């Protein structure tokens, strides 16, 4: 088997595929890329059994065939080459020879038959969504998921498909984000939980505005876009009733400049207690005072900024780290902080949602005195 390929094109696809390769895999062959060629198309597959990445590119080949190639040495070799056509030759003993304008590199490959089978799209339900919305859905929710394996459902993002809408939801019980996209052309009503690692790989692999075809069955979800397919094993757990914790009545509302608020939070958080990360917001009609103190070290800081607040003056405590993460993700110039009482969750929402989408971020308060 012999084929020629552009080194920069190959590098781009190998970089995407390398996301599914773990350092200490269950099987040694999972440290490899599976290369298979048919009709001048090279298909590159990588897997860690939880996530499988399949990506394709055009090559010039003299025959069909397949070989497993050690990923690390191949990726390092291609990275170190400037853009040029390179030629791969595979002999009957699985020896691989790579020819560049600089010289020859030899790698020992493995039998393609030993590589794990990729999950098959059977009994799937399918819908199509613009990549821009997928990226936003992942970015807005992945940071809010939990790392606690004992709360398995919360370690992933919920995709709740409801006919013409999809809700992306992430929570760790301290914070919750719900991002909704409308105008979906589907008759599906299902909820599935997608692991965050797989979602981050999808996010990194999407490089242009395109449509993403999402298919899923009971075991896996398949993201297809461009010449790439990413398959993730779904999390088999029951997601918490997230709507129950979102307060419906929020009579108090502050309109705040997002960047000013974020920068103020960063400075004040330096003075917060390192265990609770608590910052106090004191809201009045025209201003918000942000303060923090660490009694153990007699450190404290206070800042004041303009805001428009409707309702009776209120003081509420939040975790500065969580609040900062949310303000970082939000893109709007001005945001709304909606409140009911100092003991109930606060909501951060954009002043105005983009057409066809809504975004809501919930943060639990830290009780004063804690």
Image (spheres, rainbow, N blue to C red):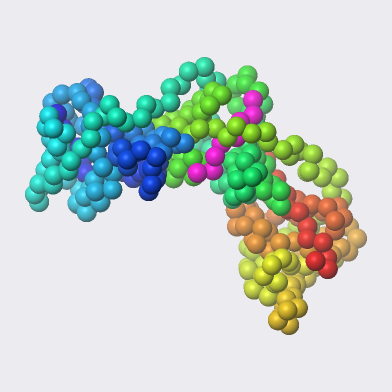
The residue that appears at 84% across and 49% down in the rendered structure is: 250
Q: Quadrant of the C terminus?
A: bottom right
Q: Quadrant of residue 257?
A: bottom right
Residue reaching furthest to the top: 123
Say whether residue 39 is left or right of residue 129.
Answer: left
Q: Height in image: 141 above or below 321?
A: above
From the top left corner, tell me how far across and down residue 83 is, in percent: 20, 48
Residue drawn at 28 percent across, 48 percent down: 72
- Left or right of 101: which side holds 163? right
193 or 263, nearer to the observer:
193
Comparing 216 with 40, the one in front is: 216
Q: Position of residue 306 (x, y in %)?
A: 75, 67
Q: Give residue 85's quadrant in the image.
A: top left
Front-most of 359 and 79? 79
Residue furthest bottom in the image: 298
- Quarter of the image with the N terminus is top left
In magenta, the rendered stretch is 190-197
Q: Position of residue 302 (x, y in %)?
A: 74, 76
Using the rendered image of the protein, determine whether residue 325 is visible from the camera's viewpoint: yes
194 part of magenta stretch? yes
- The answer to whether one can see residue 55 in this image is no
**Numbered circles on residues, count:** 0
Q: Give the prevailing secondary structure in the magenta stretch.
A: strand
Instruction: Locate residue 201, reporting x and y percent.
Output: 45, 42
Task: Name the residue: 17% across, 43% down.
Answer: 107
The answer to whether residue 307 is magenta is no
């Amino acid at each position: 088997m012999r084929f020629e390929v552009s080194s920069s094109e190959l590098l781009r696809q190998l970089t995407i595929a390398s996301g599914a390769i773990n350092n200490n895999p269950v099987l040694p062959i999972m440290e490899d890329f599976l290369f298979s060629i048919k009709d001048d198309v090279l298909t590159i597959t990588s897997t860690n059994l939880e996530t499988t990445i399949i990506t394709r590119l055009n090559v010039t080949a003299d025959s069909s065939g397949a070989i497993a190639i050690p990923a690390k040495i191949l990726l390092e070799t291609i990275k170190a080459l400037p853009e040029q056509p390179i030629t791969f030759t595979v002999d009957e003993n699985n020896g691989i020879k790579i020819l560049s304008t600089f010289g020859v590199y030899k790698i020992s490959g493995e039998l393609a038959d030993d590589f794990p089978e990729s999950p098959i799209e059977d009994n799937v339900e399918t819908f199509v969504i613009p990549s821009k919305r997928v990226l936003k859905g992942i970015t807005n929710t992945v940071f809010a998921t939990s790392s606690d394996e004992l709360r398995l459902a919360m370690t992933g993002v919920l995709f709740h498909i409801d006919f013409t809408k999809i809700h992306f939801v992430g929570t760790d019980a301290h914070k919750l984000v719900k991002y909704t996209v409308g105008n979906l052309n589907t008759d599906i009503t299902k909820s599935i939980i997608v692991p965050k690692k797989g979602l981050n790989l999808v996010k990194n692999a999407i490089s242009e505005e395109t449509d993403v075809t999402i298919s899923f069955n009971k075991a896996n979800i398949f993201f297809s876009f461009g010449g790439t397919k990413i398959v993730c094993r779904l999390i088999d757990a029951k997601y918490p009733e997230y709507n129950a914790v979102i307060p419906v009545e929020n009579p108090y509302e502050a309109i705040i400049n997002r960047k000013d608020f974020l920068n103020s939070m960063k400075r004040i958080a330096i003075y917060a207690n390192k265990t609770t990360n608590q910052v106090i917001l004191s809201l009045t009609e025209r201003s918000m005072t942000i303060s923090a103190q660490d009694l153990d070290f007699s450190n404290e800081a206070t800042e004041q900024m303009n805001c428009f607040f409707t309702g009776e003056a209120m003081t509420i405590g939040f975790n500065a780290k969580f609040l900062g993460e949310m303000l970082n993700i939000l893109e709007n110039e001005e945001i709304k902080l909606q409140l009911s009482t100092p003991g109930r969750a606060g909501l951060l929402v954009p002043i105005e949602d983009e057409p066809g989408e809504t975004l809501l971020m919930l943060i639990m308060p830290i009780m004063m005195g804690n």
